[in-house]
Image (tube, grey):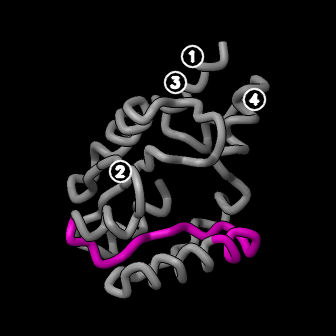
Amino acid sequence: MDIIERAVNLFDQIIVSVARNSEKGKILFSGKERINLIRESLLEMPSVKIDSFEGLMVDHAVKHSAHAAIRGLRALSDFEFEFKMALMNRSLNEQISTVFLMPHAKYTHISSSMVREVASLGGDVSKYVPTHVNQALLEKYK
């Protein structure tokens, strides 16, 4: 949310794109559930749209006439992966730029994996996710 809020101040329209071909292993929420959770989180941001895609991000960007991919960088450990991905995307389509945004310092230690792990162990993640997402996590892990 922090990255999206920052991006809204830089771009006329933001498209939050949910990848359907994620290689991140077991996914807690289905694509439809993730889109619904994101949509509810963004009700107050009319310039933000939500879409899902399968395949290459640059192809998805072209489909929406997008000129940039916004990526969040929490820490130096994110940089190497994100840098390589940005270079690959540029080699696939030079018209799509990657824009890296830093989150607020209070979120630099947070990742979706960490939130899932803490929630799965009964920990309180309510200060890191919107209320409805916290409730959905509680439901998944009861």
Image mark for residue 124: none
Mark 3 and mark 2 residues within 8 Å of each other at the beta carbon: no
Which image quarter is the C terminus in?
top right
Q: Nearer the viewer, mark 4 or mark 1?
A: 1
Residue 120 belongs to magenta span: no
Q: Decide which of tag 3 and tag 4 comes sooner along the chain.
A: 4
Q: Decide which of tag 4 and tag 1 comes sooner along the chain.
A: 4
State the separation of the CA atoms marked 2 and 1: 26 Å
Q: Decide which of tag 2 and tag 1 comes sooner along the chain.
A: 2
Give, as a single range, the part of the protein colored magenta.
64-81
The residue drawn where x is 30% and y is 59% is 15
- Disc 3 marks which amino acid? Ala
Q: Residue furthest right?
A: 121
Q: Badge 3 local density, few (<14 within 10 Å), some, or many (20+)?
A: some
In terms of secondary structure, where does tag 1 sit?
helix
The residue drawn where x is 69% and y is 44% is 113
Q: Badge 4 local density, few (<14 within 10 Å), some, or many (20+)?
A: few
> Depth check: 78 or 127 in front?
78
Q: Decide which of tag 3 and tag 2 comes sooner along the chain.
A: 2
Where is residue 90, by image quadrant?
A: bottom left
Q: Nearer the viewer, mark 3 or mark 4?
A: 3
- Name the residue that disc number 4 marks: 123
- Name the residue that disc number 1 marks: 139
Residue 49 sits above or below residue 81 on the image: above
- Name the residue that disc number 3 marks: 136
